[in-house]
Image (tube, rainbow, N blue to C red):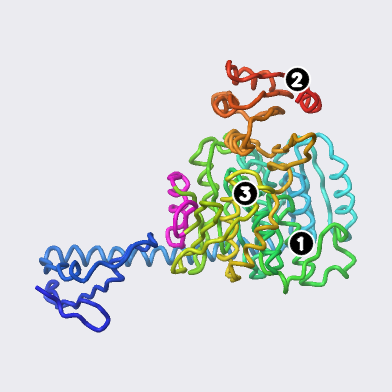
């Protein structure tokens, strides 16, 4: 039977469902796959053979029941998201409205000190500062002097073991990224404030302030490459005329950015009672176009209201097992970066083929648009060209990478650049292809990441000291492009079986001229690389290793 063709190229037929007659329409576009840019509509001849059969009463009832169940799930999900939104708003209010409150900062590294200054600017009544170190460093001592000099605020400082009484009468406890929540939970639970204390992360503490400004945020996470991609996004945006700041795990604490935003908005630079006025870099809030935030799994452990416009999970390989315990918990922490991305134009970027991270992302956010690293829509790299496609683009756009490989060693940096290009467009900006190509030509890798330090008598000295796990080391060594002398050493990370994992590098290191091990774990590294194809030399220090090379 042939169906009549309408002007909209739509086939229509009425079928009986139970006791009602329902019109069903199918257009060629509805038979296209939304996941493949190469899919085309079916030919008319095939469409004409496409027919519908009436449903039996039993089938109709099953269909109606499924639809009722689906609508109920949508309603429950909507109510759940609304409840989550209210909960996040309440938590944000408790973290920003701190007048007359007591706030504890656990861990006094750069992030902890920045959070302490932010808390001070939020008019807390009392700061409780604590760190597991036995005594403060020079930097900590200077920061403590600034905070203790603030009028109208009490400051208690505890170094050494954390005790339950340190959290007495505390309203909000802020955890620095380097402090595992599991290590402190028992101590807090034994304090007399355990039932009322709000435990949050330094990351969430800062986010509560920043997101009020409505600045588009790109969040970059993953095991390897996140600092480089964060840097590339910031470099591209700057070169293309946008004002942005890179912060988070890349170096500048998010709390420092939040404090600068707060002071700029309130004109606090003219106030005389703030802490650390000389150290915080002020920002013109109205002219800031974007924030590019590198996010670690440590920062994502504690749930927050973080809502980036674009979130990227670059990859997931075994790392930080001493903190997370297993890969599932590690993936869960990474995937939580997208938990609150519910707007129509939000975008999640995930790696192709990594089922664990894709599964965890889907569990935390099943509605947000997503693209793939290694497929379309998403990014692809070939023939020195980065091709990117957003879900709402009709096709991909191609960007020549030019001489990028000269300043940014390795094929992985071509992929890093491609992801950075996609993120820039996903933030909502538009530029001509030629302008983007000019910006790509200016890209440079961050320090300590395949950084060419010098060339002496034709020998390149490359610093890749940020390769702090086996997968990153493998990528770095492969990117050198020719047989080299490789220096491995320092204090290595332990895997669950007690080994360091260097045995996985035997294949790639067997193609190098020699391996020099140094530092605390040099003997175990050499033992794991015991192979007749590898010349392995052990020395005491990095200085000795460079001299030997």
**Residue placed at 14% from the left, 63% from the top?**
59
Distance between the alpha carbons at the discs numbered 2 and 3: 32 Å
Q: Quick one: label 2, few (<14), some, or many (20+) residues within 10 Å? A: some
Is residue 320 visible in the rendered image? The answer is: no
Q: Would residue 420 be found to the left or right of residue 450 on screen? A: left
| Residue 34 showing in the rendered view | yes
Instruction: Specify the label residue 226 is tagged with.
Output: 3
Q: Is residue 113 left or right of residue 472?
A: right
Would you place residue 536 above or below residue 203 in this image? Answer: above
Residue 79 image point, x, y percent: 43, 66
**Residue at horizontal 75 percent and vertical 20 percent from the top:** 539
Q: 117 and 478: which one is in front? A: 478
Circle 3 residues within 10 Å: few <14, some 14–19, many ≥20: many
Q: Which residue is mark 2?
A: 539
| Nearer the observer, 149 or 154 | 149
Residue 517 is marked as: none
SS label for mark 1: helix
Query: Which circle, 3 or 1, is nearer the viewer?
Result: 3
Determine crowd level at label 1: few under 14, some 14-19, many 20+ residues with C-alpha closer than 10 A: many
The first of marks 2 and 1 along the sequence is 1
Q: Position of residue 303 (x, y in %)?
A: 57, 53
**In what element is the residue under mark 2?**
loop
Position of 547 relative to 366 (above/below):
above
How far is the residue under mark 2 from the one under mark 1? 46 Å
Q: What residue span does the magenta drawing correspond to?
A: 353-377
- Residue sitting at the far front: 457
301 up-or-down from 517: above or below: below
| Residue pointed to by mark 1 | 259
* 361 on left or right of 267: left
């Amino acid at each position: 039977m042939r169906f009549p063709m309408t002007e909209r190229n739509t086939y229509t037929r009425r079928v009986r469902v139970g006791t009602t007659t329902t019109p069903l329409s199918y257009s060629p576009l509805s038979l296209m796959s939304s996941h493949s840019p190469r899919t085309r509509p079916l030919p008319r001849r095939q469409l004409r053979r496409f027919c519908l059969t009436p449903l039996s009463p039993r089938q109709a009832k099953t269909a109606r029941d499924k639809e009722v169940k689906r609508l109920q799930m949508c309603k429950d999900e909507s109510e759940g998201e609304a409840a989550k939104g209210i909960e996040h708003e309440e938590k944000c209010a408790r973290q920003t409205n701190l007048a007359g409150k007591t706030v504890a900062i656990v861990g006094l590294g750069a992030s902890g000190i920045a959070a302490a200054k932010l808390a001070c600017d939020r008019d807390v009544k009392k700061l409780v500062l604590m760190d597991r170190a036995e005594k403060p460093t020079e930097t900590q001592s200077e920061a403590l002097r600034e905070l203790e000099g603030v009028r109208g605020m009490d400051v208690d400082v505890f170094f050494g073991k954390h005790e339950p009484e340190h959290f007495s009468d505390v309203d909000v406890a802020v955890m620095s990224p380097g402090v595992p929540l599991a290590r402190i939970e028992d101590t807090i639970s034994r304090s007399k404030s355990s039932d009322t204390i709000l435990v949050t992360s330094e990351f969430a503490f800062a986010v509560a302030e920043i997101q009020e400004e409505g600045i588009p945020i790109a969040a970059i996470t993953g095991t390897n490459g996140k600092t480089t991609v964060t840097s590339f996004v910031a470099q591209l945006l700057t070169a293309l005329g946008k004002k942005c700041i890179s912060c988070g795990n890349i170096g500048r604490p998010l709390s420092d950015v939040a404090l600068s935003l707060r002071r700029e908005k309130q004109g606090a630079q003219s106030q005389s009672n703030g802490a650390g006025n000389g150290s915080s870099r002020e920002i013109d809030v109205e002219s800031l176009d974007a924030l590019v935030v590198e996010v670690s799994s440590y920062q994502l452990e504690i749930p927050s209201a973080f809502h980036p416009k674009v979130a990227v999970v670059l990859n997931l390989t075994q790392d930080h097992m001493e903190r997370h315990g297993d890969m599932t918990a590690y993936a869960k922490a990474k995937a939580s970066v997208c938990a609150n991305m519910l707007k129509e134009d939000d975008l999640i970027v995930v790696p192709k083929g990594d089922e664990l991270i894709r599964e965890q992302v889907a569990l935390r956010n099943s509605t947000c648009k997503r693209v793939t690293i290694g497929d379309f829509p998403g990014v692809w790299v070939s023939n020195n060209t980065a091709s990117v496609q957003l879900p709402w683009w009709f096709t991909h756009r191609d960007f020549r990478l030019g001489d990028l490989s000269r300043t940014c060693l390795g094929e992985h940096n071509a992929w890093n650049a491609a992801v950075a290009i996609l993120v820039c467009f996903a933030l909502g900006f538009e530029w001509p292809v030629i302008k983007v190509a000019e910006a790509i030509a200016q890209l440079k890798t961050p320090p300590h990441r395949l950084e060419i330090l010098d060339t002496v008598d034709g020998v390149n000295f490359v610093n890749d000291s940020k390769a702090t796990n086996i997968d990153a080391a493998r990528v770095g060594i492969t990117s050198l492009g020719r047989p080299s002398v490789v220096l491995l050493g320092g204090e290595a990370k332990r895997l669950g079986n007690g080994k360091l994992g260097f045995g996985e590098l035997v294949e790639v290191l067997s193609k190098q001229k020699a391996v020099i091990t140094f530092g605390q774990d040099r003997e175990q590294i050499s033992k794991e690389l015991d192979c007749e194809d590898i010349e392995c030399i052990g020395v005491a220090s990095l200085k000795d290793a460079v001299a030997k090379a």
